[in-house]
Image (cartoon, grey):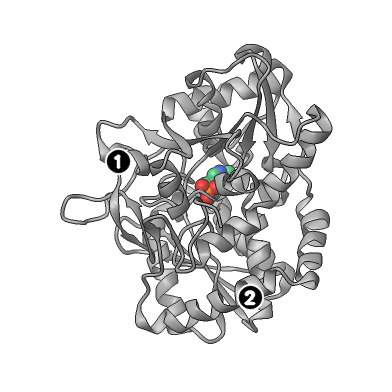
Amino acid sequence: MSKYSIDPNGYYGEFGGAFVPEILRKNVVELKENYLQIIENEEFKKDFQKLLKDYVGRPTPLYFAKRLSEKYGTNIFLKREDLCHTGAHKLNNALGQILLARKLGKTRIVAETGAGQHGVATATVCALMNMECVVYMGETDVKRQFLNVQRMRMLGAKVVPVMSGNRTLKDGTNEAIRDWCCNPKNTHYIIGSVVGPDPYPDMVARFQSVISEEIKYQLQEQTGRNYPDKLLACIGGGSNAAGTFYHYIDDERVKFYAAEAAGLGLDDPEKSAATIHLGKKGVLHGSLSLVMMTDDGQIVEPYSISAGLDYPGVGPMHAFFAKCGRTKVLAVTDAEAMQAAMELTKLEGIIPAIESAHALAMLPKINFVKDENVVITVSGRGDKDMNTYVKYFNMEE
Ligand SMILES: *Cc1c(COP(=O)(O)O)cnc(C)c1O
């Protein structure tokens, strides 16, 4: 065990744990007692790897971005998670969890979704595995992300609009947990990021760790060295970042940089989603981490132009890595992210998701030495964000 590992009680340092209602205790214990044994089983690994290859389209390319590299005076490689089936890294995790749910004998899947990407990934694997699928989504998000609602419905999922709270991701998550409480026997809850009660953060990180597993051998092939100097990723809950960092966590030659969505800036917590910068220690959705909340413990509704990053919590791993200095966390505003998205589009012909653009927007904020190797994970593609881009850049003509 290293100083960065999760401990047997599910804590990264002071963050993590499993804070669940009594009625769910049994499910969480069932998961905890079985997940490692199942996912390390050779037959499971073979099934998972085959689907990652033939269905998701892995390995995703590690692309040397020549013009971007020239602009920033260093060697920049893009890890192209945007090329995964359904458009983002989320399918890696959804696929792993549905295979696990089958092994546990579950027949029904519930999930939460904000921007709809995790809902689409979950609906996709449920269609693939012929499982019943219910996705809880705040009613505000149902309106904002209607294309993804239509995709989920076409895939056969039942999308339930949630009318409580601000009707966004946090409220969808509450409702998914409530459903799981009512149907603990036959239902598995597929959480979409490295959040939630232990063992979810560790389990999701393991499913996403295929990203850094590939980076290792792809860098070896392309640079003759299997590690980069710097790794950059964006953080909502933190799953693409966890996957990007995973196999380098104990390799301190590799510096980690994570971008949080600062929305309109750090001055007004109601106009930001920078949880690590602005959050306080608290429990949200089953784990102790940093949470955007008022002094008396009310959750603050976060804001970001990117619907995939406006979560009021963050995975306990990232709260810990930030606190002990393993990861440098930078706050990126809406405007900086939008500029970075346009820059990547113009220089490399790649339209990124707005979430991923937050990672790219760290480039002007970091001092690079000439000829270091830098890997940035492009977590998803920008198709789902075209309306926002068109409006923001006045491209309506
Ligand atoms: C959901 C999403 C994110 C944020 O989630 P993480 O768990 O932090 O990775 C980032 N990028 C894209 C494209 C997403 O769909």
Total number of numbered discs in the rendering: 2
State the residue in front, 368 or 357. 368
Q: CA distance from mark 1 to mark 2?
A: 36 Å
Estimate the x, y position of residue 205 in percent, counting from the top left.
58, 56
Q: Is residue 142 left or right of residue 165?
A: right
Residue displayed at 53% across by 30% down: 389
Quarter of the image for the C terminus: give it. top right
Q: Residues within 10 Å of mark 1 (few under 14, many from 20)?
A: some
Please give the name of the residue rendered at 42% of the width and 30% of the height, measured from the top-left corner.
334
Q: Quadrant of the N terminus?
A: bottom right
Residue at the image point whose x is 65% and y is 52% from the top:
209
Dot 2 amino acid type: Ala
Q: Position of residue 358 (x, y in %)?
A: 50, 32
Does residue 395 appear in the picture of this structure?
Answer: no
Query: Is 11 placed left or right of 188 in the picture?
Result: left
Residue 101, disc: 2
Residue 320, placed above or below residue 9: above
Q: Position of residue 29 (x, y in %)?
A: 49, 79
Tell me which amino acid carries mark 1: Leu
**Pointer 1: what residue?**
278
- Residue 36 place in picture, x, y as percent: 63, 70
Mark 1 in CB contact with mark 2 (< 8 angstroms):
no
Residue 152 relative to residue 56: left or right:
left
